[in-house]
Amino acid sequence: MAQALVDLEAVAVNTRMLRRAAGDAGLMAVVKANGYGHGAIEVARTALANGATWLGVATTDEALALRAAGVDAPILAWLYPPDGGLADTLAARINVTASSVHALETIAATAQRHGRVAHVHLEADTGMSRGGASVSEWPQVVSAARELEKRGALRVVGLWSHLAVAEAPDDDGVNQQLRDFGEFRQSALAVGLAPEVVHIANSTAVLRLPESRFTLVRPGLALYGIEPMPGVVYGLRPAMTVSARVLRTTRVPAGTGVSYGWHHVTDRETTLAQVPLGFADGVPRAASGRAVVWVRGHRVPIVGWITMDQIVVDVGDLPVRAGESVTMFGPGDRGEPTALEWAEWADTIPSDILSGIGSRMRRTYLPPERPARLAGEI
Ligand SMILES: *Cc1c(COP(=O)(O)O)cnc(C)c1O
């Protein structure tokens, strides 16, 4: 009844644009959270066919799901339980993050128990205060990593950090983070580590901060076509359109209460449409009273509370009938709302809207045309 139509051609075009923006750096396509709601496997395949060289996910389970689907590219996962449990992950040749001596020892022990060499990316904290080793912890982390590397338990494939303030209008914070990252890198090289990839750039940084690219960039949101820098247009193409069909319409008089609590009361005679899209599908309840949808070429308001499975739309005197398509958001070029507008109505960010698109929603794909030729054009 409700569907998310994913335009993989848009993902392909965005990937190639990011690839050009990355210059000589490689491109890690971030496909965590089911590819920001778009479908991790489909997005991964499309990105890899269009120039991505790595895949990034949050959890090791997400990485294992990609391997189970036959995706063979290098994958980095940055989250796993504190006690490790990484045997399957290492067996599947998934790169894991470490930011403490304890994590390195856990990884090395698992690898040696199973006769493997773990591939590790060391994470430095340059200002997120979330994950990553601090400046004071870093010397022990890099020396321990080098020792375990010499013993053949692991290989330090990468060094990375995450930007906290890439989107801030003034660049002082992000420049400080980049300088600090450069220092973390120097001290890693000084103990003899020789990482193949060094990475910090998210979507915004890839597009606007050439000095953030190092040897690999790590965009997520931009792959899906959402402009990551407020107020700046780089020409990305939104990939997802969410729509549903009207189940029924009803003509009601002025003074009719709508949805839970009757927080909305009609101010005139009008037509209400019942649409099977709710907060369990990712329509944020917080947007109640503000959001509009697109029907028959018009923007019409959702009225009353958004409920778990349904919304009520006031279509006025438009001749809307059961079966007609209602668009929650899309690329915006026909006048339909965008994920960015939904984020504003719900007082959140577009990544929250996209990754919130529920598992109940059927995903359908527009395959890129001539993917082989497109891949060959890079
Ligand atoms: C989500 C995430 C990204 C991608 O960020 P965008 O802003 O969506 O480009 C990159 N790196 C890490 C560690 C992340 O968690």
Image (tube, rainbow, N blue to C red):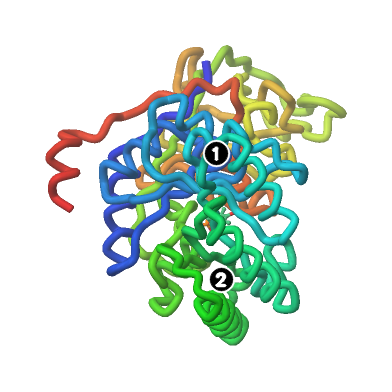
Q: Nearer the viewer, residue 374 or 369?
A: 374
Amino acid type assigned to the residue bearing label 1 in the image: Leu
Determine which residue is flagged by label 1. 90
Badge 2 density bin: few <14, some 14–19, many ≥20, Cα 10 Å? some
Report whether 22 appears left or right of 4.
Answer: left
**Where is residue 107 shown, x and y percent of the image?**
64, 47
What's the amino acid at mark 2? Glu
Residue 57 visible (yes or no): yes
- Residue 83: x, y in percent? 77, 42
Cα distance between the residues tagged 1 and 2: 35 Å
Dot 2 falls on a residue whose secondary structure is loop
Q: Residue at x 60, y 64 (%)?
A: 147
Q: Residue furthest front?
A: 151
Q: How many marks?
A: 2
Residues 23 and 154: in front is 154
Q: Is residue 365 above or below residue 372?
A: above
